[in-house]
Image (cartoon, rainbow, N blue to C red):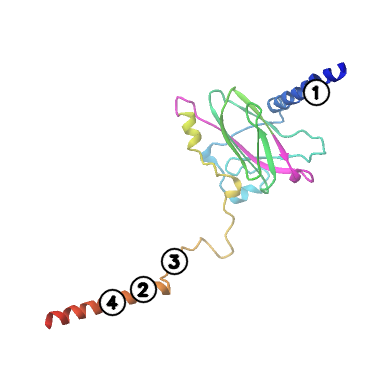
C-alpha cells in the first residue's frame, strides 16, 4: 500500500517536470541562426526571389525543419533589440500545407498549416524562436519554410498595439504574383457587356413609355 501511495505523487511530479521541460525548451533552444531584418522599403517583391537561394521575398528568410528521425536540432532563431517593442512573427511552409509551429513567449505552442501569424509584446531585449513541424507532413522529408520577424518602432514614435493592428497580416511569399503567360504584357482590363436580359428590359421599358405618351396625347385631343 505504501508503494501505491508514493507512486501517485511521483507520477504527478513526472508530469510536472515534463510540462516545465517543454517551457524550458521553448525559451532555451540552442541558437543556430541570428535574425537580420530587411527594411520594408527594401523588400524584394519579385516572384523569382522565392526560388533564389539567397532571395529575401518580402523580407522573409528561409530555413528547413529537419526530418524527425535525423536527430538534427530544429531551427532556433534569435531576435535582438526587442525590449519594450512588439514583435510580429510570420512563417509558412514551402510549399504551403505542412503544419509548422513555434513557441510564443510564455511557452504557448502556435501551429498552423496555412501560415503562422502573431504580434506579441516582447518581455526582454532578445527572444529565441524555435520552429518545428507537426503531423504526417513532417514524417517523410525535411520541411522548408519562410519566416520573418518585424520589430515595432519605439513606443515614443508609435503606440505598439496600434502598430500591430495596422500590419498587413496576409503578406506572405506565396502572395507574390507569378510570371505572365508568353506574349502577355499586362492583365486585360475587364469589359462590361450588357446581357440579353438587360437589353430586353430596356426595350420593354421604351415601348411602355411610347404607349403612355400616345394614350396621353389621344386623351388630350379627344
How far apart in space, not on screen, are marks 1 and 3 (Cα)? 71 Å
Q: Which residue is mark 1?
A: 11
How far apart in space, not on screen, are marks 2 and 1 (Cα)? 79 Å
Q: Which residue is mark 2?
A: 201
Instruction: Work out whether mark 4 precedes mark 3 in sequence or the reverse, and give the earlier one.
Output: 3
How far apart in space, not on screen, are marks 4 and 3 (Cα)? 30 Å
Q: Which residue is mark 3?
A: 191
Residue at point 66%, 44% (across, down): 113
Residue at point 83%, 18% (across, down): 5
Q: Can you tell which of label 3 and label 2 is closer to the viewer?
A: 2
Q: Can you tell which of label 2 and label 1 is closer to the viewer?
A: 1
Q: Is residue 6 left or right of residue 217?
A: right
Verify CB contact (< 8 Å) between mark 4 and mark 1. Answer: no
Verify CB contact (< 8 Å) between mark 1 and mark 3. Answer: no
Work out which residue is located at the far front of the displayed protein and give it. Answer: 1
Instruction: Work out whether mark 2 precedes mark 4 in sequence or the reverse, and give the earlier one.
Output: 2
The correct choice, above or below, for 89 with respect to 180 in the image is above
Density class for disc 3 (Cα within 10 Å; few <14, some 14-19, many ≥20) is few
Q: Can you tell which of label 1 and label 3 is closer to the viewer?
A: 1
Residues 136 and 28: in front is 136
Instruction: Work out whether mark 1 precedes mark 3 in sequence or the reverse, and give the earlier one.
Output: 1
User: Where on the picture, by quarter, is residue 7?
Assistant: top right
Q: Which residue is mark 4?
A: 208
Amino acid at each position: 500500500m505504501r508503494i501505491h501511495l508514493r507512486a501517485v505523487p511521483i507520477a504527478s511530479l513526472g508530469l510536472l517536470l515534463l510540462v516545465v521541460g517543454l517551457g524550458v525548451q521553448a525559451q532555451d533552444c540552442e541558437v543556430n541562426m541570428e535574425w537580420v531584418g530587411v527594411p520594408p522599403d527594401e523588400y524584394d517583391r519579385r516572384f523569382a526571389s522565392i526560388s533564389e537561394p539567397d532571395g529575401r521575398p518580402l523580407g522573409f528568410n528561409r530555413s528547413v525543419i529537419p526530418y524527425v528521425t535525423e536527430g538534427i536540432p530544429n531551427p532556433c532563431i534569435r531576435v535582438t533589440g526587442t525590449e519594450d517593442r512588439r514583435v510580429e512573427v510570420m512563417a509558412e511552409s514551402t510549399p504551403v500545407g505542412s503544419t509548422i509551429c513555434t513557441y510564443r513567449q510564455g511557452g504557448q505552442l502556435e501551429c498552423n498549416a496555412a501560415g503562422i501569424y502573431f504580434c506579441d509584446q516582447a518581455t526582454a531585449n532578445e527572444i529565441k524562436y524555435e520552429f518545428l513541424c507537426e503531423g504526417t507532413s513532417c514524417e517523410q522529408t525535411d520541411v522548408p519554410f519562410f519566416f520573418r520577424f518585424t520589430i515595432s518602432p519605439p513606443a515614443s514614435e508609435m503606440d505598439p498595439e496600434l502598430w500591430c493592428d495596422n500590419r498587413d497580416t496576409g503578406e506572405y511569399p506565396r502572395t507574390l504574383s507569378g510570371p505572365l503567360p508568353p506574349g502577355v504584357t499586362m492583365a486585360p482590363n475587364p469589359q462590361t457587356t450588357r446581357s440579353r436580359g438587360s437589353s430586353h428590359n430596356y426595350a420593354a421599358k421604351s415601348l411602355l413609355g411610347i404607349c403612355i405618351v400616345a394614350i396621353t396625347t389621344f386623351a388630350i385631343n379627344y
